[in-house]
Amino acid sequence: MNFDECLVPYILNSDEIQGQVDQMVTLMNQHDIPEPNESSKNCAYAEQYA
């Protein structure tokens, strides 16, 4: 088998990253515990363990 190598150009838009980081920092710094997410395996495990 022979394979050809090629580079695929990708344009990265990093405009959303800072907003997402700010939201995560705000969430981590709040004193209230957020509601569990049903689709999270960790939340489901914690609820089953409790």
Image (spheres, rainbow, N blue to C red):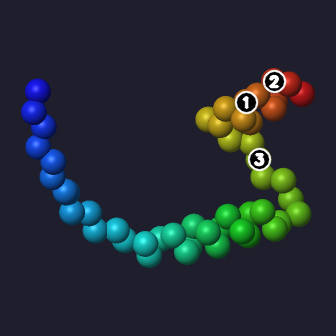
Nearer the camera: disc 1 or disc 3 = 1
Q: In this view, does 24 lie to the left or right of 14?
A: right
N-terminal-most mark, 3 or 2 = 3
User: CB atoms at circles 2 and 1 under 8 Å apart?
Assistant: yes
Residue at which label 1 appears: 44
Tell me, yes or no, whether the two marked residues, 1 and 3, touch with CB atoms within 8 Å. Answer: no
Q: Which of 15 and 34 is in front in this view?
A: 15
Tag 1 secondary structure: helix
- Asked whether the beta carbons under mark 3 and mark 2 sit within 8 Å of each other, the answer is no
Give the position of the N terminus as an image quadrant: top left
The span from disc 1 to disc 3 (Cα, nearest Å) is 12 Å
Q: In which quarter of the image is the C terminus?
A: top right
Q: Mark 2 points at which residue?
A: 48
The residue shown at (47%, 71%) is 16
Q: Residues within 10 Å of mark 2 (few under 14, many from 20)?
A: few
Residue type at mark 2 is Gln
- Rendered image: mark on residue 16: none
Q: What residue type is labelled 1?
A: Ala
Residue 20: give x, y in percent of width and height: 57, 67
Q: Name the residue under label 3.
A: 35
Q: Is residue 12 above or below residue 37?
A: below
Q: Which amino acid does label 3 sit on?
A: Glu
| Rendered position, 30 above or below 33 | below
Q: How far separated are the C-alphas under marks 2 and 1?
A: 6 Å
Distance from Cα at disc 3 to Cα at disc 2: 15 Å
Which quadrant would residue 21 be assigned to in this image?
Answer: bottom right
- Viewer-proximal residue among 22 and 12: 12
